[in-house]
Amino acid sequence: MNANGQNGASGAKSRLAGGQRGRPSAETTRWRMAQLLEVARAIFVRRGYRATTMDEVAAAAGVTKRTLYAWHRDKEALFRACVLLGAERFPRLEPDAAGDPADALERYVVELHDELTREDSFGMGALFLREATDFPELAGSIQRGHLDYMIAPLAAFLRRHTLEEEGSVERTMLFVAMALSPLHNAMLVGMALPSPADVLAHARRCVGIFVGGSRDG
C-alpha cells in the first residue's frame, strides 16, 4: 500500500496501458485517432468544408487543439484522412477468388451502393460537388480515394478474368460509371435513390452489358 492506503493498482494499470504513467497506449491512441475521424467526417457532412473549423472538431472529439494538429497539420489534411477513411470501406474483389466473375461483380455493385448511400458517404460526395469549385484542393483527396481504393483493385480483378486490358483502367472506369449511375443521378439531378430491389436489377443489367461487351470486344 502507499501512504494513502491505496494499493497502487490504478497506477500499475496506467503503466500497463501506456508503457508509463500518464501516456496512452498505442492501441488507445489509434482508437482515439479513428474516433476523431468519425467525428470530423460527421461535422464535414453536416456543416460543409468551409464552415468546419479545427477548433470545432477538436472540441467535439474531446482532444486538445495541439493533439489535433499533431495528427493532422491542417483542415485539408484532416479532410483527406476523412475521405480515405470512407474509401477503406469500399468493397474489394480478390483477383483469384473462385466462382463466376459475373456473380461477383453483381454483388460488388450492390455492396458499393450500400456503402455509398450511407449517410456519411453520400454526404461527403455531396459536399465535394457543392464546394469543389471554391476549394479545388479537395479534388486530390477524392481522386485518390476513387482511383486507389476503387478503380485499381477492381481493374486487377477484371484483368484476371480478361475483362480489362493490361496496363489500362478504361473498361474499369466505364463499368464503375455505369454501376454508379443511379447515385450520380441522385446527386446531380435530384432523382430518388434506388430501392434495394432496383439496385439488384441495375447490377444485373450493368454486369450483363459489361461482360458481354468486354468479351465481344
Image (cartoon, rainbow, N blue to C red):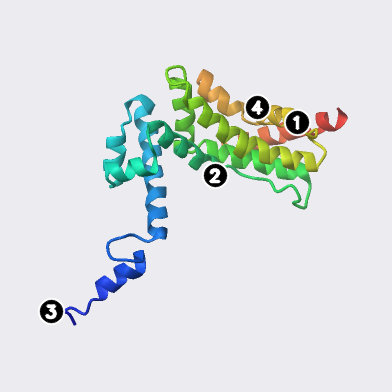
Q: Position of residue 127 (x, y in %)?
A: 44, 26
**In the image, farthest residue toward the right:** 216
Give the number of the mark in front: 2 or 1. Answer: 1
Mark found first going from the N terminus, 1 or 4: 1
Would you name the residue on which mark 3 appears? 3
Label 1 close to label 4 by CB (< 8 Å) = no
**Kind of residue at badge 2:** Arg
The tag earlier along the polypeptide, 2 or 4, is 2
Q: Residues within 10 Å of mark 1 (few under 14, many from 20)?
A: few
- From the viewer's perspective, is 4 left or right of 137? left
Amino acid type, mark 3: Ala
Q: Which residue is mark 4?
A: 177
Tag 2–tag 3 contact (CB < 8 Å): no
Helix or strand or loop: what does disc 2 sit on?
A: loop
Q: Is residue 197 visible?
A: no
Question: What residue does disc 1 label?
Answer: 168
The CA distance from mark 2 to mark 1 is 24 Å
Type of amino acid at the residue the image marks with label 4: Ala
Question: Closer to the N terminus: mark 2 or mark 1?
Answer: 2
Q: Mark 3 or mark 1, which is nearer to you?
A: 3
Where on the picture, by quarter, is residue 114? Answer: top right
Question: What's the distance in space between the residues labelled 3 and 1, CA to CA?
Answer: 71 Å
Q: Is residue 153 left or right of residue 58?
A: right
- Camera-near label (2 vs 3) is 3
Q: Earlier in the sequence, mark 2 or mark 3?
A: 3
Please tell me which of labels 3 and 1 falls first in the chain. 3
Checking the image for residue 89, the label placed there is 2
Give how far apart the Cα atoms at labels 2 and 4 are: 19 Å
Residue 41 location in percent, x, y?
A: 40, 38
- Residue shown at 38% from the left, 27% from the top: 49
Badge count: 4
Q: Secondary structure at mark 3?
A: loop
